Image: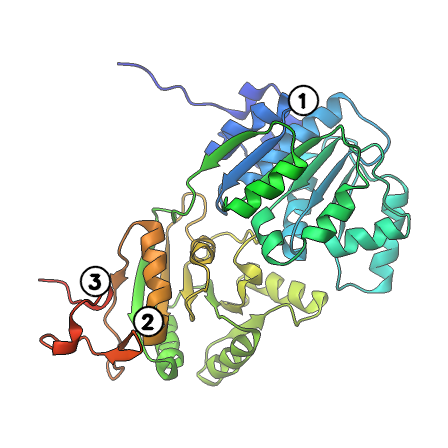
Amino acid sequence: MRKILTLHFHDFLFEYEIQDGLDDMGFETPTPIQELAIPIILDGSDLIGCAQTGTGKTAAFLLPVLNKMVWDPIAATDTLVIVPTRELALQIYQALQGFCYHTNITSQVVYGGTDGISFEQEKKALLHGANVVIGTPGRLIAHLNMGNLKLENLRHLILDEADRMLDMGFVEDILKIINQAPKKRQTLMFSATMPPKIRQFAAKLLHEPKEISIAVSKPAERVVQGVFRVHDKDKNSVAVWLLKEKNLPSVIIFTGTKSKARQLERDLQKAGVNAKSISSDLEQKEREEVLRAFRSRRLPVLVATDVLSRGIDIEDIGMVINYDVPGDAEDYIHRIGRTARAESKGEAYTFVSGEEFRKFKRIEELMGMEVTKMANPAGIAEASVAVQGHLHSKKPGNPNSRGKSHFFRKKKS
């Protein structure tokens, strides 16, 4: 029988300064995206990497780039990482600190929503030529316009969560930044999805890129998924029941809007649940304070909009609740990807009203699976299905029920 060899980080022959950092952090075996991406990046090729959240993309692009910087250092900004949100910028920056702990590589993270003191600190680091700069498009442009950020020596350009940046309307900003960079550079683009618009965007920026794709549009197998078919007016009651029934120390609830997040926070608190909401409306310091409380388990329930569905690396989240069905089927994958990270297990439940049926059906089609339909708590009626403008009950024998999807059919016992 053929023996399957396990690849270890030592097999990449990183410079000892990088390997020492990995050893300190307990990194032993690369994930599939790391195993495929690292040799390509070390070889100097441009790359399009497609992988969902939680697969180890950050290390996949940081480690080979940092290794090349140790081997061939320059006293200037060598690498620029552009990301859609400040949360993702901070996550990458924190990972970077561990990876280059034993090196002389300098770095700076820049993002909006901070005070004048923070801006001055960013300016000072950029003017001194921080080797690695991680930032959001708007803030990077501000520093470029003021002459603080100089890209003439840039050797590595990295776009992380590229699909999200395009969805958020950052295309023009990104192009303005890239136009300041040398044409001869290595460009790496990572995205959780690969729609045509991403390929068109990549064609403008990358030169003969290699392409890798890992487990696109599939949730982690360790996530137990379930659906509660409930009317909008009953979602709060089901949320309170589920939280108290499971009694887990770390839960994220995703809502479709900021106003719903704030209202749900108030309703949960009235019901005796220790919960806080987080959205783009909060000041950066407030958001960081809430996240610290959640990470440290002082706050067991976090109510969030999709600002957290990607790019936030919080370990051991026991359960994700989709209070609203996300409009984009891919966003469902990213939301439930907050749980069952690494080798842990997790649960993910979605509240689906009749009006949300079609959206959830598209999610099931994307995943190629039917999600288990859960029994509602006592006293909570099951929602009806809105089909072609009519409400169809799921009562067997209803003459109007022909053509209904499997979604609201009872399974045979």
Q: What element carries label 1?
A: helix
Q: What element carries label 2?
A: helix
| Relative height, residue 301 to residue 380 (above, below) | above
Q: Hey, what amino acid is under mark 2?
A: Glu
Q: x%, y% of residue 2?
A: 30, 14
Task: Name the quarter where the N terminus is drawn.
Answer: top left
* Mark nearer the N terminus (1 vs 3): 1
Q: x%, y% of residue 17?
A: 70, 26
Q: Hey, what amino acid is under mark 3?
A: His
Q: Give the class, few, some or many, for how many residues have Cα within 10 Å of label 2's Cα (few <14, many ≥20).
A: few
Look at mark 1 in the image and give the residue it sits on. 16
Look at mark 2 in the image and give the residue it sits on. 245
- Which is in the foreground here, disc 1 or disc 3? 3
**Residue sitting at 38 percent across and 78 percent down?**
235
- Please state which of residues 192 and 266 is positioned toward the viewer in this rendering: 192
Q: Hey, what amino acid is under mark 1?
A: Tyr
Q: Left of 203 or right of it: where is 400?
A: left
Q: Label 1 to label 2, Cα distance in Å?
A: 49 Å
**Residue sitting at 83 percent across and 38 percent down?**
151
- Please state which of residues 317 and 85 is positioned toward the viewer in this rendering: 85
Q: Left of 329 or right of it: where is 70?
A: right
* Mark nearer the N terminus (3 vs 2): 2
Look at mark 3 in the image and give the residue it sits on. 406
Question: Within the image, what quadrant is residue 129 found in?
Answer: top right
Q: Label 1 to label 3, Cα distance in Å?
A: 56 Å
